[in-house]
Amino acid sequence: MDWPNLAAFVAVADHGGFSAAAEHLHLTQPAVSKRIALLEDALQARLFDRLGRQVVLTEAGRLLLPRARQILAEGEAARRALADLGQHIGGRLSVATSHHVGLHRLPNLLRRFTAAHPRVALDIRFMDSEQAYAQVLAGEVELAVTTLGPTEPPLHSTGVWHDPLQFAVAPDHPLARMRATTLADIAAHPAVLPDPGTFTHRIVAQTFARQGLSLQLRMTTNYMETIKMMVSVGLAWSALPQTMVDAQVQVLAVPGVQLSRQLGYVVHGGRTLSRAAQALIGLLQEDSAGGQRKPGA
């Protein structure tokens, strides 16, 4: 059932004839007659009785008329909404992010985004990076902004921030008193790290494994703030993001060893992103192109 045919039907009913409807629609009378015939053929029902020059609705026509008006009204509303979409970005945008990225990388970016697009309803979900990947794959969120790990189609990842990791201990930890530190020295002491299944844990563990070393884990937790607290009170060493290093901890320099991870966004390659998601990605790409911004800067 085509909207132009419905519009012709309503116009004939409203104006009482084919000629008047044709004038209203800026069509020829034969064109209006053809549209009505196509509609009657599609519905398998006669909609008008032609009584000389008078045109009256049949029972089927009277039944259809209010529904046709509703369909046309909804179609016009949809047209206006799509027209508005071309000028204003709105709707709901679901984003998954890790607690660390959400706290240390996103606040200023999200402030800029909400100022530029106040009609967007942000649905931000905090979770582990690996869970964020799964939510993008399942279509539960449009994109994830998180630590990047191995990514396979249909997922696509794009790096935004280079995130160096630093071996860190409490200022009074035995390792802090050593002039030169090796991975073997560090491995001799308990560590606190994210869970073994996380991307960050794998980066650290693989660095030690390449030298035939294993880790002594005091405990694991995926909250980097908790990890930093345990390091700062001397319970363990860890590999902390550079953005979290301050006077509470002491960095260990290990010659020849550099740890780092990539932070960025992940999308599903088989799905069309909303304009809100595209706008957020645009800001992320600006951050990437602008170099490493300091958190809070």
Image (cartoon, helix red, strand yellow):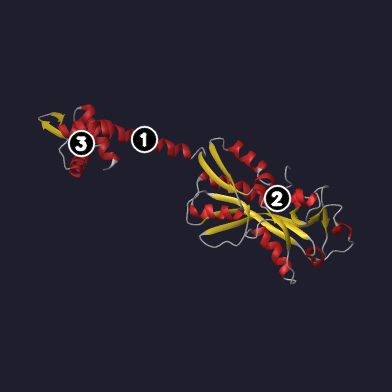
* Residue at the image point whose x is 71% and y is 62% from the top: 204
**Dot 2 or dot 1, earlier in sequence:** 1
Q: Nearer the viewer, mark 2 or mark 1?
A: 2
Which residue reaches farthest bottom?
Answer: 212
Q: Quarter of the image for the C terminus: give it.
A: top right
Residue 76 got which mark? 1
Q: Nearer the viewer, mark 2 or mark 3?
A: 2
In the image, residue 106 sits, relative to residue 52, either above or below, namely below
Instruction: Locate residue 4 relative to residue 44 in the image: left or right.
Output: right
The picture quadrant where one finds residue 256 is bottom right
Which residue reaches farthest front?
Answer: 218
> x%, y% of residue 159?
64, 56
Residue 224 got which mark? 2
In the image, residue 181 sits, relative to residue 271, either above or below, namely below
**Dot 3 or dot 1, earlier in sequence:** 3
Q: Is residue 111 visible?
A: yes
> x%, y% of residue 152?
55, 63
Determine crowd level at label 2: few under 14, some 14-19, many 20+ residues with C-alpha closer than 10 A. some
Q: Is residue 22 visible?
A: no
Distance, label 3 to label 1, CA atoms, is 24 Å
Comparing 277 with 186, the one in front is 186
Q: Quarter of the image for the N terminus: give it.
A: top left
Residue 29 got which mark? 3
Distance, label 2 to label 1, CA atoms, is 51 Å
